[in-house]
Amino acid sequence: MKDKLKKLFSYYKPYKLLFYSDMFFAIIGAAATLVIPLMVRYITSEVVYFNENKAMETIVFLGSIMIALVLVEFGCNYFIAYYGHMMGAKMEADMRRDIFSHYQKLTFAFYDNQKVGALLSRITSDLFDITELLHHGPEDIVISIIKIIGSFIILANINLRLAIVAFVFVPAMVIFAVYYNKKMKTAFKRNRARIADINSQIEDSLSGIRVVKSFANEEIEMEKFHKGNDGFLAAKKISYRYMAGYHSTLTALTTLITVVVLLVGAKGLTTKTVLVADLVTFLLYINNFIEPVKKLINFTEMFQNGYSGFDRFQEMLSIAPDITDAEDAVSVGKLKGEIRFEDVSFQYQDTNEPVLSHINLDVKAGEYVALVGPSGVGKTTLCSLIPRFYEATSGKIEIDNTDIRKMKLDDLRNNIGIVQQDVYLFAGTIMENIRYGNPDATDEDVIRAARNANAHEFIMSFPDGYDTDIGQRGAKLSGGQKQRLSIARVFLKNPPILIFDEATSALDNESEKVVQQSLEMLAKDRTTFVIAHRLSTIKNAKRILVLTEKGIEEQGSHEQLIQKKGIYESLYHMQFQ
């Protein structure tokens, strides 16, 4: 816990001046509220017995001071509320930056086991509660300590017996708060997990809304939602039960203080051991130290909310990316694209079954290689090892005679262009989506890339042309149009190595023909790996690799493999029967 708190407090570092200013005004504001009841006591015990003129002069003078103190308190509270909250918002932004930056570093292996909604929850609701703690926590503690200690010192000097009666309840409050603290911590952490679950379910359902509606499965989605919602409600029910007991007990104790002091003070009035002015002052100060006690009560709740959120925040940041730059990684410029697999094997971390076993492969720069084979034999995985989306379990992969693990990741991936079956387009315009391949490209470069991808004509058919908003994930475009935009994006990137992962398998024949032409233009003079679902699309490939669970079992041109009458010939005839 010590290390976590140290990390939590480190977020104050860039805002030291703002933090100290916040604490300064918190102290001044708290001190101002302590002075006013003393002045009331002086007026009720002394000034009222002055002659009329002197009494009025003194009351006006003291009234002016009290008004000035109210204005000071107003200014302090304004500074705390505005600049204090801004400090919290800036720290929240820093944390959001850190966790989003960390998300960018994590690899496919991590995202294979995560839900987007759960990750989103950690970057939104969790962070809000953390920053509320970082902003309000220190100032609430400072204000509360000053008011409680200051009130006790002042009241003890006025009447020690009544002061002890008033403060004897505070230890009971502290013990009670500590006891409930542990229970609330567990409950709030459970709430965080449940809200992450329901966020995931909502995100999943809304992302797949077209599938939901096409199967008329709205009721099933509602059932899933109700299940998650009820789980969250159940978790909330437990935490609210603790909160109810917590707040009601502490509120009762604070009210009890006023009642007991009033009763003991009233008895003192009858025995002449307590003055009326002193009892009035006590009642004013009781409110002055009950308020900070309530602040401390709220702080414990805020602490549980914020700390459980920070716990989850740290939990995410502690997940180290399993693929990073080696210490001796070198920068590489434009690669030629000569690729070698040397005894490469791969298996996922959570399984014992190898996906690839002892793969040996030499691909010359500019060569066009097609990968075919049954589903699940590792065609996509083999290609994913080249840009190090996954790390080979054993063996090594070289590009231009350099181990890819010795290259800087950004440099390696800048040399590789990928066109996938499931195209991902970002919300925004066509221009923005193509430019994603090279953020520094000019409009002319983008248009040239679109022409090369056979996309310019359909783009210009839209009223807004390249400024057309394509909707979430390109919802306003057809499959073929989306695919051509993704190809234009890679044209703009202009990499020496290409990977086509079943890029035309989801398209109709007409779209496939156009996209195929674009792919062939893109592949010219580049090292190209094509994962083929439709064997007709790779008949012209000079080299076809047939991948099975045993590895690369056959390779050669289409004609050579047909003549072998092996696995490829069987797959080919099966597809065209």
Image (tube, rainbow, N blue to C red):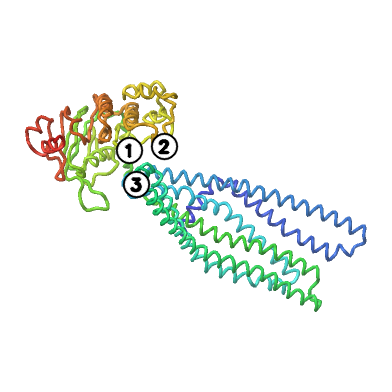
| Amino acid type, mark 2 | Gln
| Amino acid type, mark 1 | Leu
Name the residue beneath numbered marker 2.
472
Report the side of 573 relative to 230 (left or right): left
| Amino acid type, mark 3 | Tyr
| Image point (15%, 31%), residue name | 543
Tell us which disc is closer to us: 2 or 3: 2
Tell us which disc is closer to us: 3 or 1: 3
Instruction: Indicate the position of residue 34 as horizontal and vertical percent values.
Output: 72, 60
Tag 3, which secondary structure? helix
Query: Is tag 1's residue or tag 2's residue first in the polypeptide sequence?
Result: 1
Name the residue beneath numbered marker 1.
409
How far apart are labels 1 and 2 at the CA level? 29 Å
Tell us which disc is closer to us: 1 or 2: 2
How far apart are labels 3 and 1 at the CA level? 18 Å
> Where on the picture, by quarter, is residue 386?
top left
Image height check: is 1 above or below 381? Answer: below
Image height check: is 541 above or below 193? Answer: above
Q: Is residue 317 visible?
A: no
Name the residue beneath numbered marker 3.
111
